Amino acid sequence: MKLVYTSENRFLVGNARNILAAKGIDVTLRNEHAASALGELPAFEAWPELWVVNDEDYDTACEALRHALSEKGTPPWRCSNCGEENDVAFDFCWCCSTDRPGT
């Protein structure tokens, strides 16, 4: 197992877990409830951690998270088929299901 993501914000870790689950990558969450130990443990040791179960999936997991997290601030894209504007989170048009260019 390899550590792939950690944050003091458990919601961000949960989001990362969902991103990897959607890619079919098996992960495990550690320190999910360790916040109650703050004060007895250093803060960084109590942060929730997301670990990739299969080491072979580590590079794919890193790339998936890098891609997902770098989309912040990216402008929407326009569908080449119907002209609808789509949020960057969509890989296909919400209106006509045409794939986003470059996917």
Image: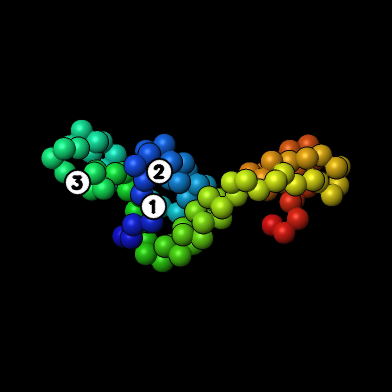
Residue density around tag 1, few if under 14, some if 14–19, many if 20 or more, within 10 Å: some
Q: Position of residue 26 (x, y in %)?
A: 41, 52
Q: Secondary structure at mark 2?
A: helix
In this rendering, would 98 be left or right of 73?
A: right
Q: CA distance from mark 2 to mark 3?
A: 19 Å
In this rendering, would 15 be left or right of 103?
A: left
Q: Nearer the viewer, residue 62 or 20?
A: 62
Q: Position of residue 69 (x, y in %)?
A: 53, 50
Quadrant where the C terminus lies? Answer: bottom right
Q: Residue at x 47, y 50 (%)?
A: 20
Instruction: Check residue 13 in the rendering and tell me which mark sits there, or answer none.
Output: 2
| Residue bearing the label numbered 1 | 5
Lower position in the chain sequence, tag 1 or tag 2: 1
Q: CA distance from mark 3 to mark 1?
A: 18 Å
* Numbered circles on residues, count: 3
| Residue bearing the label numbered 3 | 42
Disc 3 residue type?
Pro
Quadrant where the N terminus lies? Answer: bottom left
Lower position in the chain sequence, tag 3 or tag 1: 1
